[in-house]
Image (tube, rainbow, N blue to C red):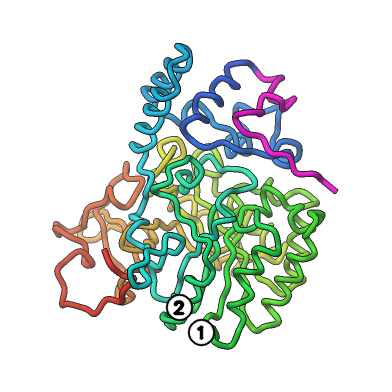
């Protein structure tokens, strides 16, 4: 049995591999980790990172802060205060100022929080009619923190931007009122840090006949990549698998939304055994990742990753564009580059891998896919569509943006052909908006 050990800013220098590195690397972790959350574990350290190639290793970069993840001015400001042994309140104030400048609420997530009467349901997001996101309070951490994570405020003490809810009763009351909801996504953080007993308490009520309108239960998790022993040797691993089997036997579709950012995360014996155990319950595993500089900006790597996922009976699901938050400047790629990586990988794999969609961006208005680049009457344009939208009538309608070789996110694009606004931004006939679709 592998015993879980966590590493944070308080104890990461006890990692022998870190102690053997040049001192400046540890110092950079210390400075950047004060602003952006840092947490790793012994599985990542011992089985995933190539310690002989730390300067360029993608798994080290996924887990350990690097100097380039902070703007040079921000880095210098924190470094100076630390060197001066400034009072903690001054250091905390500077850190908070920097965090607020990093767009901690991307895509207007606050606008997705619904009400139940006068009660604001801080642990629910309801952006699209058929799907709600639920943030169980006991699942608001992870086995390790991804350095690109767009939910970094959840782990940074920014309580005003934290989504979490403990009351199962409020969730069930909300679902009783919203029969248009067919899917519920348990997210965080990571729900799979929770004990089986606590996770069951949230899920089992959903299996009763009164929630027959709920067809799919999704669990968003990085645990397969960062702690596969959750399904192998943890004290309640068998209980988790029994819960999964029970969900499937009840007639619900169970989909584990697994995050794999690099093929190496699929390479260990433990992750492959964990995947097999989950699949044996009847659950699906769908895979997703952003495309990121320094990590996976290579079409051959994506081709390898999708093929391996299918070999393991997983379903490639999404390639995202790195969210416009946190250390995005370190990971971001031009949209044209994202599209080229996607299409060059996509054309090398068979149809069973082509379930994947992308590259896509989660904008305030919806989930937007970049379909390609074309030239129409002498004008070079981006071709886009909504995979999901606040207004379902927008879904799957192609629309066009002026080509911009430097753009890395949708809000940097302008409508093509001289239009002032995109079609969904124009004033339209009034529509009846359900209560959760407020702005």
> Which residue bears the numbered disc 2?
181
CA gap, disc 1 to disc 2?
7 Å
* Residue 132 in picture, x, y percent from top left: 46, 69
Magenta segment includes 6: yes
Q: In which quarter of the image is residue 234?
A: bottom right
Q: Is mark 2 on a helix, strand or loop?
A: loop
Question: Which residue appears farthest toward the right when viewing the image?
Answer: 1
| Region in magenta | 1-21
Q: Residue at x 61, y 38 (%)?
A: 39
> Is residue 345 in view from this perspective?
no
| Camera-nearest residue between 377 and 266 | 266
Q: Residue at x 69, y 58 (%)?
A: 195
* Residue 389 in picture, x, y percent from top left: 35, 68
Number of marks in the image? 2
* Residue 249 in picture, x, y percent from top left: 71, 82
> Is residue 81 in view from this perspective?
yes
- Quadrant of the frame with the C terminus: bottom left
C-beta proximity under 8 Å, tags 1 and 2: yes
* Residue 98 in picture, x, y percent from top left: 37, 32
Drawn side of residue 380 relative to residue 66, left or right: left
For label 2, count other residues whose C-alpha is less than 10 Å away and answer few (under 14), some (14-19) or many (20+). Answer: many
Magenta segment includes 123: no
* As drawn, 120 above or below 107: below
Of the two numbered discs 1 and 2 on the same chain, state the one appearing first in sequence: 2
Drawn side of residue 422 relative to residue 276, left or right: left
| Camera-nearest residue between 367 and 241 | 241
* As drawn, 150 above or below 436: above
For label 1, count other residues whose C-alpha is less than 10 Å away and answer few (under 14), some (14-19) or many (20+). Answer: some
> Which residue bears the numbered disc 1?
213
* As drawn, 195 above or below 34: below
| Camera-nearest residue between 34 and 87 | 87
Q: In which quarter of the image is residue 87?
A: top left
């Amino acid at each position: 049995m592998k015993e879980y050990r966590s590493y944070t800013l308080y104890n990461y220098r006890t990692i022998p591999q870190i102690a053997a590195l040049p001192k400046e690397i540890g110092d950079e972790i210390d400075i950047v980790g004060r602003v952006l959350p840092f947490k790793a574990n012994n599985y990542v350290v011992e089985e995933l990172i190539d310690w002989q190639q730390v300067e360029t290793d993608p798994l080290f970069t996924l887990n350990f802060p690097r100097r380039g993840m902070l703007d040079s001015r921000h880095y210098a400001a924190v470094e100076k205060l630390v060197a001066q042994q400034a009072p903690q309140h001054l250091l905390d104030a500077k850190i908070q100022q920097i965090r607020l400048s990093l767009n901690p609420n991307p895509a207007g997530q606050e606008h997705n929080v619904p009400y139940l009467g006068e009660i604001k349901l801080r642990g629910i997001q309801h952006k699209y009619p058929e799907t709600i996101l639920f943030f169980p309070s006991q699942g608001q951490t992870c086995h390790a923190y991804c350095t690109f994570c767009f939910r970094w405020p959840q782990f940074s003490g920014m309580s005003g931007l934290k989504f979490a809810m403990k009351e199962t009763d409020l969730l069930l009351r909300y679902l009783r009122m919203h029969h248009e909801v067919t899917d519920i996504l348990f997210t965080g953080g990571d729900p799979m840090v929770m004990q089986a007993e606590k996770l069951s308490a949230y899920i089992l009520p959903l299996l009763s006949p009164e929630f027959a309108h709920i067809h799919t239960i999704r669990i968003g998790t990085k645990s397969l990549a960062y702690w596969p022993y959750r399904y192998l040797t943890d004290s309640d691993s068998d209980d988790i698998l029994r819960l999964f089997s029970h969900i499937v036997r009840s007639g619900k579709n169970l989909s584990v939304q697994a995050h794999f950012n690099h093929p190496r995360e699929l390479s260990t014996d433990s992750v492959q055994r964990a995947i097999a155990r989950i699949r044996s319950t009847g659950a699906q595993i769908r895979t997703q990742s952003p495309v990121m500089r320094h990590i996976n900006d290579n079409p051959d790597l994506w081709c390898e990753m999708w093929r391996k996922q299918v070999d393991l009976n997983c379903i490639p699901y999404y390639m995202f564009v790195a969210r416009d938050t946190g250390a995005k400047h370190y990971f971001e790629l031009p949209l044209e580059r994202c599209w080229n990586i996607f299409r060059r990988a996509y054309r090398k794999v068979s149809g069973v891998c082509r379930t994947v969609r992308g590259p896509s961006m989660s904008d305030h208005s919806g989930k937007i896919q970049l379909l390609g680049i074309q030239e129409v009457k002498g004008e070079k344009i981006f071709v886009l569509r909504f995979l999901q939208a606040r207004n379902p009538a927008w879904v799957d309608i192609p629309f066009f943006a002026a080509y911009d070789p430097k753009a890395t996110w949708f809000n940097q694009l302008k409508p093509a052909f001289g239009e002032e606004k995109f079609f969904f931004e124009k004033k339209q006939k009034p529509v009846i908006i359900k209560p959760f679709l407020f702005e």
